[in-house]
Every structure is written in structure tokens, then in C-alpha cells.
Image (cartoon, rainbow, N blue to C red):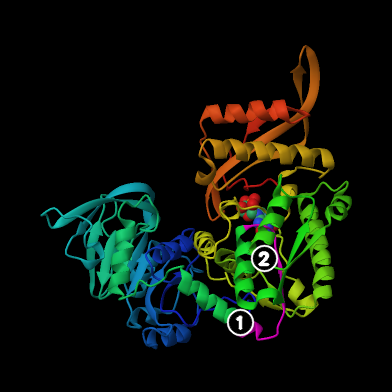
Amino acid sequence: MERSDGVWKMEKERDKVVVLDFGGQYSHLIVRRCRELGVYAELLPYDYPADELREGIERERGHGKICGIIFSGSPFSVLDDNAPKCASDVLDFGVPVLGICYGAQLIAHLNGGRVRRGEKKEFGSADFFFKKEERLFRGISDDGEQIGKTRVWMSHEDVIEDLGGNGEVIGWTENTPVAAFRIGSNYGVQFHPEVHHTERGKDMLRNFLEICGCERNWRIDEDFVSERVYEIRSVVGSDGKAVCALSGGVDSFTTAVLLHRAIGDRLTCIFIDNGLLRDGEREEVLESLRNTGMKYVFVDASQRFLDALRGVRDAEEKRRIIGKIFIDVFEEEARKIGADFLAQGTIYPDRIESARAGASGGRASRIKSHHNVGALPERLRMKLIEPLRDLYKDEVRKLAKTVGIPDKILRRHPFPGPGLAARIIGEVNAEKLRICRAASAIVEEELRKSGWYERVWQAFAVVGDDMATGVLGDARKEGRIVIVRVVSSEEAMTADFVRLPYEILEKMSRRITNEVEGVTWVAYAISSKPPSTIEPC
Ligand code: XMP
């Protein structure tokens, strides 16, 4: 297992498909779809060194071979001066390449073809006609005709006019004469097979993986757990000690359980109550810790956090303070234990997104400074272990289930490091914390009762300083406004508000105004991300 140092590197042991990332919004989704089809896939930057790719392609099967390459979409046009491009010889490396959207245009461009700006953008669903004899479309339509038809999702402006040498058009739509093509064993599709709106997109990806000869052996099961446990043992050695910051979320808990399996009591979990936890969370985490038999230290530092947050209104300043105190408290405890390793539940999108931000030379603007213990290993001279570093959230959940993490933790919605402070606009104080905590608990409870909890990404209440008039009996009463936020999301990068039935919203509102002292109004947040974020601070 490598140390993560912000450098975006290829994993070397598993056979894989590589997705070259040209900055498209669906790049992660392509990787996830391949993995769902049982093939290990990785996202690499578009300018990943060609000789390393070639070296990966030349490996034997079963020894980290690259079996196929997919070019992602991109916000750029191949006609732009600064368009991201990979070396053209990638197309001749001898493994099949599939280009998606921009990726398809790039293949045509690199093959000596011609791409031009379209008169208008094509966005949305379209009827796609294709040659059924092509392997990419095998099994997608089984009537007797030679030309098949299915719905696909388009999102492009440029059009491919000419494919260059050897190219053959294998699919088209009314507006796009070259919607799919083959050049030797390389393919291009102008639409997005990775999104659900493309009805048979997953089948097309499965066909491509078959063309690549990929073995479908990517599974999160007991063998995977044994592999990770073995790796952790070999990294930590026979007498190394590790600490793990446990937040109670599924990532940190799964990390801790893997470490515990590998090194037993040489792992100490550190659980810090920052005073910003959800209702009942402290007790639940402590109970789960006791049940799993892991060694742990519990620190109630809530007063220290709340004192430091007094009078602070700025969202980023609050995050900075919480992050700093967290590191201070953690450091004090870790020093007492004297560990050599820090185990952290970093997952694949976190790691790639920081590397992507780094790859933009710091040009990507920082929306929120994320709370983590990133600076700690240097300060404490500890080495970092990140056993989940290659996994997506749904894969972590599978792993968590395999190692027997309690259902309560497994099914909990993601919760930010700065805790309820991310849901309190303005100063964090005892009054607003009480309201946010109690109202969030009601939101969660009503979703659980109605069967919606597991269908949404996150659900909670937000509170700020605005007051609104209400009536209590016959008297006027000033109280706070609570905003209920329930979103669906793909890995938190985009989010949409959930169209909850009015009866559920009404029940939440009634209970919040009746049961949470000091609230007179309840509103429902209907903005999406972007332009909003999921949590307001
Ligand atoms: P936003 O609110 O920025 O959040 O749309 C995206 C997702 O990330 C979670 N979040 C965090 N997670 N440390 C974390 O580990 C943080 O500092 C942090 N801030 C936000 C948030 O809950 C949502 O799921």
C-alpha cells in the first residue's frame, strides 16, 4: 500500500481499465459503472505519462495489466487552443480505446479526422440507430432487423464530420450523423453510456469491457478483506502501533475495523466529542465501539470547541477553528499513545478530487476547506494508512457489511467533519445547536418512518439568526426559522432537492414547531447543487 502524498498514481497490482480524465463531469461515473460490471477501473489524468501506460499495457494478465482505455468527456472542445490532449500513440498501444463525447471527438481528431463546431448544442434524450452486427451493440436489440434503435443521452456542441483513415460510422441520430464509430478496435460514442438516461448504456460498456477481454473479478468480499488485512499487517509490521480518528461514520469505522483485524490491540481508536454531534450520536458510537471490542480513548472536548466558536460568524473561520482544535486534541491523545501510524478513512473520490484540484495548479477555487487530519502525520511523524483509498462510497458500504459493521452506522447519511456547525448559519451557540440537533432528529425520524431515509443522500435541519412571528394561543411569539434540507446526490458532487410528498413535509413542520422550543417557521430548501452546496456553511 502506498502512502498517499497527493500524487495521482496508478495502482500496480490489479488488472484494470483506465479512464483518462479530460475533466468531464461524468468521469467518476464511468469508473463506477465499470466497477459495477465487476471490472476494476481507475481514473487517471489525461496527460498521465504515456510510457507508464505502455508499461501497464505490456504486463501479463493477472499482474496489473491495463486491458482497455476510456477517454472521458470534457468541458473543452478539441478545437480550443488549450484543449487537453493525450499522446496520439495511445490509440496504437494495442488495447481497445473507447472515447465518450469529447473523448470520441479526440479519437477522430487524433486519427486525422475533422471536428467542427455545431450550429446548436444537442442536449438531452435522442433516438439512436445502430448497426447490430457491431460487437459494441451486441444483445441490445434482438428483432430481426439489421439496424437497432435505443434512447441515448446527448450533451455536446461540436460534431464529428470526418473520421480520418479507416473509420466506420456504426451509429447515428437525427441530428448527429456520426454518433458512434469504430476505427480498428477503437470506438467512439458521441452520447454518454455511463448515465442512466442512456437506456442500454451499461450493456454497451459491458460489451466494450468484453472486447477488452477484461476479467470480471472486482468484488468486495471476504477475499478483498483478507487482502487488505494482509497489506496492513505488512505495512505496520509485527510491533508497530496505530491510531485512528473515529467519527462514527461508515468510512472511519470500516477503516478501524480493518486495522483491528490486522493488528488487534496495537490499534487505538480516538473518538472526540466536539459538541457538534447529532442527537444520540455519542452514545451510539460508544456502544458500537464497546461491541466491536476495539481499544479506544474517548475525549469530551465539547466545551473547548464551543468556547472557541463563541462570537464567530464566518463559515470558513468556523471550519478553521474546528479543524485546528480537532488536530490539537487528537495530537495530545496520539502523543500519549505514541503510535507510528495514523489510519484514515479517505476514500477514492476525496483523494482524486484533491489531486484534481492540485493538478489545476491551485486554480480550482476552494468552496469549503474540508475538515481532516491531513497535517497530522507530518507533525507527529506518523505514517498514513488509508485502506479505503481506492473505493467509492457504495463499495465502502459493501465492505462495511462484509466486516460486520452495525447496520445503524452502515446506513447513516454522510455527516461533515465540522458537524452541526455546517448547518448553523452565523454564530454557533447552545440555543441554535439545541434547535438544529432536535429538528434534524425529527427530519431523520420522519424519513425513517416513511421509508424515505435510505432513498436520499442527506437530510437535516438548518438554523440561522432570522426571527419570524408566530402565534402561541392568542399571543404573538417571535421564534426562529428552521430550513429543512433533503437531497439526492451522486457522490456529493452534484445534488438535487428531493420531491418529498407534502404530507411528510407537513408532519415534519408540525412536529418541529410543536416539539422544538423557540421555532415558529419551517421552510423547505429547493435549491440544487450547484449553485447551492448541500450544507450552508
Ligand atoms: P457540501 O455542503 O460542500 O458538501 O455540498 C458535500 C458533502 O461533503 C460533506 N462535507 C464534509 N465532509 N468534512 C467531511 O468529511 C468536511 O469538512 C465536510 N464538509 C462537507 C457534506 O456533508 C456533504 O455530504
Residue 325, image quadrant: bottom right
Return the mark for residue 233: 1
Label 1 crowding class (10 Å Cα cut-off): few <14, some 14-19, many 20+? Answer: some
Quadrant of the rendered image holding ligand 1: bottom right
- The amino acid on which the numbered mark 1 sits, given as a three-letter code, is Arg
Q: Quadrant of residue 289?
A: bottom right
Picture quadrant where residue 164 is located: bottom left
* Coordinates of residue 81 in the picture (x, y in percent): 49, 68
The alpha-carbon separation of the residues under discs 2 and 1 comes to 19 Å
SS for callout 1: helix
The residue shown at (58%, 47%) is 529
Q: Is residue 172 above or below residue 333?
A: above
Identify the mark nearer the N-term, 2 or 1. 1
Disc 2: which residue: 293
Q: Is residue 245 magenta?
A: yes
| As drawn, 201 above or below 111 | above
Tag 2–tag 1 contact (CB < 8 Å): no
Q: Residues within 10 Å of mark 2 (few under 14, many from 20)?
A: few
Q: Residue furthest top?
A: 474
The quadrant the N terminus occupies is bottom right
Q: Is residue 110 visible?
A: yes
Residue 64 percent across, percent down from the top left? 43, 82
Task: Report the front residue among 520 and 276.
Answer: 276
In the image, the segment drawn in magenta is: 234-249
Foreground mark, 2 or 1, reads 2
Task: Name the side, left or right, on which 370 lies relative to 27.
Answer: right
Q: Is residue 491 above or below residue 51?
A: above
Q: Tell which of 94 and 457 is nearer to you.
A: 457
**Dot 2 lies on which element?**
loop
Q: Position of residue 118 (x, y in %)?
A: 36, 55
